[in-house]
Image (spheres, rainbow, N blue to C red):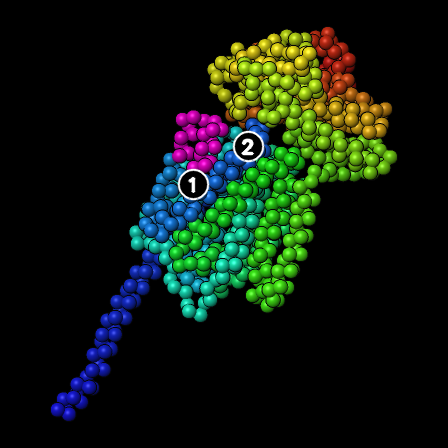
Amino acid sequence: MKTTNSLHASCSPRTIPWKSASSTSNSSTDSAMAANGNNRTLAAVLTGSLFTSLGVGLFAFTIPLLSLDERVSGAWLGTAFAGYYLAKLLVSPLSGMAADRFGPKPVLLLASAVGCIIPLGYFLSPGLTALYAVQVAMGMVTGLVRPVGLAALGGSASGPALSRRFAVHAALFNAAAFAGPILGSLLYTTGVMGPVMIGLSLCLGLSLAATFLLMPREAATSRPAPPKTEPPPSKGRAFSLLLAIGGRSLGIGLTTAFYPIILTEALGRHGPVIAATFAAPGLATFLGLLLTGRFGSKSPDTDRVVLGMLVSAGALYALGECRLLWQFATFGVILGLGAALSIPASMYFASSLSRKQGAVFGAANLASGLGFLLGPLLGGAVVHTLQSPAPGLKVAGLIGALCCLPLLACVFRDQLHWGRGLAWTASGLAAGFLGLMLVLNLSPRLRMEAQEDGLYRFTDVAMGTVVKLTIEAPSRKSATLAARRTMTAMRALQQDFDHRNPRGSIGRINRAAGHSWVKVTPRAFDLLDRALKFSEATGGIFDPTVGALTTSPFYYAMDESVARSKSNLVDYRMVLMDRPGQRVRLKKEGMALDMGGIAKGSIVDAAASLLQKHGVKYGIVEAGGDFRCFGDRDWHVGVRHPRTDAVFQTIPIRDKGVCGSGDYRQFVAPSKKDGRIEHHHIIDPATMDSAHKSIGVTVIADAAELADALATTLFIMGPARGADFLKQYSPKSACIWFLPDRTVAYTDNFPH
C-alpha cells in the first residue's frame, strides 16, 4: 500500500506537466489567433481611414475655392462647413454606441457604402444645393468612420502598443490631409466639380473594399481591463481633456473652411502652391510623429497633450498675421508639429476613460464635433464683422489656448505638484491675458503699412477685396482717425449695396421683386437712379437688372438655354422708382438687381470725399485695382495686362478715377489649347452670354463711379463701338482695350 501510494505520488507530478503543456498550446493558439485578428483590424482601420480622409480632404479643399470663384459670401461658406460638422456631431455618439453593440464592421461598411454613392448624385442636379447635400453626407460618413475606427483600435490593444497604433493612425490621417488638397487642386484645375466628385466616390469605394476584405467579423470595441496599479481618471481631468479637444477642433474647422481663401488672397491663384501650403501642416504632423518618437514604446504624458495644443494654438494665431509664402510655410509646419505632439497622446488618454471604446470615442468626437461646428460659424461671423478671414485664425488660436487651460491646471497640480490653489491661479491669470487679446482681435483694426514724406499708407479689407488708403495728414493720429472712419463708411455702403446682404437696400428690393415697393436708403436710391440713367444712355448694354442671372451661383457656367430663359427678366425699364417716397419696385417676380458694375466705384468716390472732409488734402483710394486719386498732386498708376501679372503701362493721374474690367476676374478655365476664356462673369444683356469683344479694359474718368460703369460697358462694346460712345457720352474720359488677338486699342486721349 505504501509502495502503491508512493508510486501514485511520484506519478502525479508527471501527469500535471502533460496537462499544462496542452493548455499552454491551446492558449498559444488562441493568442496567435487573437493577434492575427487584431492585426487585421489594424490594417482595415488604417486603410479605410486613409482613403476616407483622402476623399473628404480633396473635396473639402475645393469648396472654399469654389466659393471664391463664385463670390459666395463668407457666411454661406461658414454655414456649409457647419452643416458638415453638425452632421458629424450628431452621428458620432450614435455610431460609437452602435459599434459597441453590433461590432465595428457593419457600421464601417454602411458608412463607406453611403459615402461612395452620395457624391454621384451631384451629376443628377449640379449646383450649390447638391454640393451642400454632399457636404452634409460627408459629415455623416466621417462621423461614423472616425470614432468607430478609433474604437476598434482601442479594443485591439492596450498600454504602449495602443499608443503606437494611435500614432500610426494619426500619421496616416495627416498624410491624407497633405495629399487630399493636392489631389483636389489637380482635379479642380478646370474649375469644374465633376472630377472632384468622381475622386471622392472612388476614395470611399476603396475604403469600402478595404473594410469588407480586411476587417474580421469578430472585431470588437471593448478594451482589456487596465492594470490594478493604473488609477482611474478623474471626472475633472476627463472634462478638461474633452474641452481641450473641442478647442483644438474649433481651430481645425475654421482653418479648413477659410485658410484656402486666406492663402489665395495673399499669394494669388496658384493652385498647386496654395494646395501644398494648405497641406503643409498635415505633412509636418506626419513627419513630426516620426521625429518625436511617437512610434516608441513609452506611453505619452498629459504634459505632451497640453504642450502640443498650445504650440498649435500659437502657430494658428501667427498664421493670421502672415503675408508671405515662407511665413505661411513656417508657421504651418509649427502647427503640424504641435499636432504631432497632441493628437496621439489625446487619443490615448481618451481611450483610458472607459473600457467601452465606442462610447469613449463617441464622446471625444462629440467634443471635437462641437468645435468643428463652431469653427466655421465663428469664421463666417469674423468675416462679416471684420471683412477678412485672417483675424479668424487669430481668434481660433486664442480660443484653442483658452480651452487648454483647465488641462494645463491638471498638469501643474498632478505632474508638477504645485497644489490646487496655485495651479488654478496660474491658469486663471493666463485666461485673463488670453481673453484680453481675444477682445482686441475682434475689434476692427486698420493696418498702417508705411509713413514717408507726410504720407500715411493703410491697408484693410472691404467689398471682398484689399483696400489701400494713401493719404496726406499732419500727424499719425489724424491720419489713423480719418482712415478708420473711412473704412467704417465703406463697409456700411457695401452692406447696403450688396445683393448678398438680405438686410441691405438692394437685397430687400430683390426679395420683394414682383410683389411690393421697398423703402431704401437715400444713397442706394440715388445710386440706382444714376445707374438707370446710365443704362438708358447705353441702350441697355449696361443694365443692373442682369442680376436676374448674375445673382445665381455658377451663372457663367450655366447652360446657355437656362441663361437665355431669364432674358425676359432683364430690362432696366422694369425698375419702378417712387421719387417722393424713395421707394423701388421690380415689376416681375424673379427679377434682381446686381450693382456690381457701378457700386465699387461709387464707394471709392465716397471714401475719397470723406477723407477730404476730414482735412486730407490729397490722397488715393484703391480697392481691388480700382482707384480714385484726389487733390493737387500727380500719381502714377500701373495698368495690368489681363493675361500676365506684369504691368503693361504706367500712367500719370491727377484728381481722376481709374477702373478696370476683365474676363480674368471670374471665369471657367479654358479647355482649348489657345487659352481663350469662353465663359466669364461679364454678361452682355443682349445675348445673356459672356462678352468676347475684349479681354480687358482700363478707363480713366473724372470719378471712380463713372470709370467703373464705363469699364463694364466699354468691355462689352469693344473698341469700335465703344470709342464712338465715349466721344458722345463722356469725351473727357479715356480708355484702353486689350483684345482677344492680344492687340491693344486706345482712345486718342489715353496717355500712351
Q: Is residue 689 above or below residue 371?
A: above
Q: Position of residue 742 (x, y in %)?
A: 64, 20
Q: Report the quarter where the C terminus lies.
A: top right
**Residue nearest the observer in this picture, 80 or 576:** 576
Three-letter code, disc 2: Trp
Residue placed at 65% from the left, 11% from the top? 578
- Mark closest to the chain's N terminus, 2 or 1: 2
Toward the bottom, the furthest residue is: 2
| Residue corresponding to mark 2 | 76
Toward the front, the furthest residue is: 581
Circle 2 packing at 10 Å, graded few (<14), some (14-19), many (20+), is some
Left or right side of 564 for 738: right
Q: Position of residue 625 (x, y in %)?
A: 70, 27
Q: Which structural element holds mark 2? A: helix
Residue placed at 73% from the left, 25% from the top? 604
**Residue nearest the observer in this picture, 160 or 751:** 160
Q: Position of residue 244 (x, y in %)?
A: 55, 53
Residue 140 numbered mark, or none: 1
Three-letter code, disc 1: Met
Counting every numbered tag in the picture gives: 2
Residue placed at 42% from the left, 28% from the top? 123
**Does the magenta-highlighted stretch encompass residue 124?**
yes
Circle 1 packing at 10 Å, graded few (<14), some (14-19), many (20+), is many
Left or right side of 408 for 368: left
* Separation (CA) of disc 2 from disc 1: 20 Å
Q: Is residue 628 above or below residue 346?
A: above
Left or right side of 360 for 567: right
Residue 442 appears in the figure: yes
Residue placed at 36% from the left, 57% from the top? 222
Start and end of the magenta stretch?
118-138
**Residue nearest the observer in this picture, 682 or 537:** 537
